Image: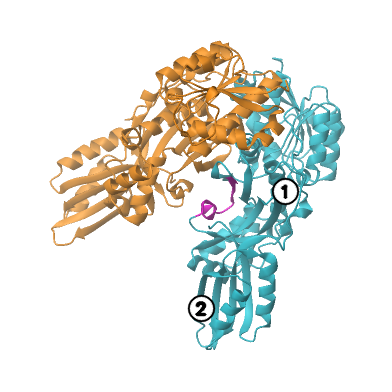
Chain colours: A cyan, B orange
Amino acid sequence: MNSRVGIGLLGLGTVGSGVIQIIKEHQEELQHQVGSPITIEKVLVKDVEKQRSIEIDTDKLTTSPDEVISDPDVDVVIEVMGGIHEAREYILKALQQKKHIVTANKDLMALYGPELLKAASENQCDIFYEASVAGGIPVIRSLVEGLSSDRITKIMGIVNGTTNYILTKMSQEGRSYEEVLAEAKELGFAESDPTSDVEGLDAARKITILANLSFATNVDLEDVVVRGITTVTLEDIEYCEQLGYTIKLIGLAQRDEGKLELTVQPTLIPNSHPLASVNDEYNAVYVYGEAVGETMFYGPGAGSLPTATAVVSDLVTVVKNMKLGVNGRSITGPLHSKEMKSDEESKAKYFLRLHVKDETGTFATLTSLFSKHDVSFEKLLQWPIKGEETAEVVIITHQTTRATYEEIYKKLEELDIVLDVKSTYRVEGGN
Amino acid sequence: MNSRVGIGLLGLGTVGSGVIQIIKEHQEELQHQVGSPITIEKVLVKDVEKQRSIEIDTDKLTTSPDEVISDPDVDVVIEVMGGIHEAREYILKALQQKKHIVTANKDLMALYGPELLKAASENQCDIFYEASVAGGIPVIRSLVEGLSSDRITKIMGIVNGTTNYILTKMSQEGRSYEEVLAEAKELGFAESDPTSDVEGLDAARKITILANLSFATNVDLEDVVVRGITTVTLEDIEYCEQLGYTIKLIGLAQRDEGKLELTVQPTLIPNSHPLASVNDEYNAVYVYGEAVGETMFYGPGAGSLPTATAVVSDLVTVVKNMKLGVNGRSITGPLHSKEMKSDEESKAKYFLRLHVKDETGTFATLTSLFSKHDVSFEKLLQWPIKGEETAEVVIITHQTTRATYEEIYKKLEELDIVLDVKSTYRVEGGN
């Protein structure tokens, strides 16, 4: 097989254009690795006449998916069109015609990953999706191959660039959530409708994909407990800083006593933790393995060329497998059937900020409520608010279950001395 | 091939014991991935009778390398004995007998990597060496596969745990080099003879391996310009902190205008750079690719279990390749013949600390010397030293060639107003 390898592209947006650019500019290096030229044969677009930033023969453009999928010169279909139902349909059709698949589609892989992997395996085709999580960071490969001998127990990911940009700017520049979000929209770091990002859904999709790979299991998007960043205030960020913590939107997946826990929520991370210095729109995935201990993979989570790098690296693997005649044979099914930990069972430390009456006995009332539930404090700060008969209290608890914590929380709200529960967050990354 | 895969182990020190422990404890997961049980057949040791921390049949221990290499039940030889000449001899013999190789030996791979890769390829055997660089971090795999589609232009690695531990403790605890080195020896973070670590040789070996992989070329250990950390003082570290920088022992490999530059030296990194917060004995490799931009891989650089994780993950790949019948076919030769940039040609910013006479005109003399050589200042601080007629001057230059910088440096030493040139370091990671 020294003849050329033909590519069919579904979609020609930012990522698709990046893929064409890399294949063109790095052709010499790619040929050196795979031993054959790689050519773009057909590209599915919405509008053939549209002006484009990259050069491409209009002959190769088509508005018909079948012309891409059924082209006999197409060996590998690269899906970068996004969306769910059409993408799924086209990929399944392509697999039936023995085309290998590379996709950057996290929504699709989070919802239909197991189905697509099975279809690929049955057709002896490859399907790779490195670009679906954390753009340019080769984290899927690291989990599947680099750490294949280890037993991973915990993953914490900053896997949404928009929210990390917002939280970083709030923290570094002391600006409000609303102000930074508006700026992020202007700069193109946030969508005009940012719901999926700021409410944590995008991160939840990625953590679903990572959990299935890391724990060799079969979790669903609905297994993820999701809380967004819309309630994070500048005051919260400032108090956390005083305590030596940074607030990040963390996608967490962990295995504990055989049960899995999956959650996305704003989380306090100690400043000494490697995740705390992952700033702006950057992504990072922190992995804890029984044998290896702590590792972290850092890089750009999105963008045309970074994402295209992941896509084309997957393509290189597909082409190498084609030469070796081993496509579709690296797909392994899950080893463990899933057993989820309920949100109530999950254990963590918590940060809590309250406004209380500034009077004798307040402190004692608070400590007694917590100690009745066997929860002790790791940190407790209390100071008067100027000109009011109110004190600000900030607590970081030791580890407890969510159920216990919620019980305490409910009773706190009922206490006479408590004027207002301002905010609460999960705390990770300590001992 | 559902029968067992037999392992021969050369060496049973820290890493070897870790390999046996992981293969035993993670047997179920390993079998799930490769479809066969993995068994330890023979282990080369110095002393069969020695008490060991791990359980192993004494029948399997031998002091004869041939009993390991020639055992027909051994499919894969894992070399974790260290050293150079014997390890090389055994590996070459094993390859001739069609045994696949996994090694953790950076000294060997830095010196004889190309020879061993060629021998493996000729014998259709695999040779993998993930553990030779940055212990538990799957960085080799990320470079070879994850970023295979990109053109890497720069690598900066904190790849020596001992020196990173020393520099971290000096910086965080304000203790001297000698004091921290003594402590590191006691804690086992430094060898009793730490020369190879503190003089940068160990890091140079690793950067040689990384450069060959990243740039698809054939550099030698002698191509690396090496400077150690023995001259770094507490004062240097403190002045750097005031300027917003951290001193790290950085192994740097970069390609610029078609030429390669390789160096290991104490280097100032801005605190906002992801390498600056890699502390204690941890390692990290920062990679800059034309398309992907900045990525970083972080984790433990040494230790029994982390290193063994990398070894056993390589083993998993070997066994998968055995099942697919494709061993030895992923080895590609270099694409580019090496063209080195001389040390004089290399471009960088520099940090410089001087004691000068505290008198009018000093500042003007200094600036005029630098501007005569077309080198401008990014930062310049000057303040009097209490009770003396001396001032401390700290300069960070804009980018210049090493040749120009050395010319300035020589002339500085001859200047009347300059009492003492205290220290100078390369600066990286800015714009």
> Which chain is home to disc 1?
A
* Residue located at (67% from left, 52% from top): A257
**Label 2 amino acid?**
Gln
Q: Residue at x 58, y 79 (%)?
A: A368
Amino acid on which disc 1 is placed: Thr
Question: Mark 2 falls within which chain?
Answer: A
Which quarter of the image is occupied by the N terminus of chain A?
Answer: top right
Q: Is residue A46 visible?
A: no
Give coordinates of residue B21: x percent, y percent: 56, 35
| Mark earlier in primary sequence (2, 1) | 1
Question: Could you give the CA–CA distance between mark 2 and mark 1, rounded to whole angstroms?
Answer: 39 Å
The x, y position of residue A146, in whole percent, is 60, 35
Q: Say which residue label 1 marks.
A: A208
Q: What residue do we see at 35% from left, 36% from top?
A: B197
Residue B175 counted in the magenta span: no
Secondary structure under tag 1 reads helix
Where residue A391 appears, x then y in whole percent? 54, 82
Disc 1: CA contacts within 10 A as few (<14), some (14-19) or many (>=20): many
Q: Are marks 2 and 1 in contact (CB under 8 Å)?
A: no
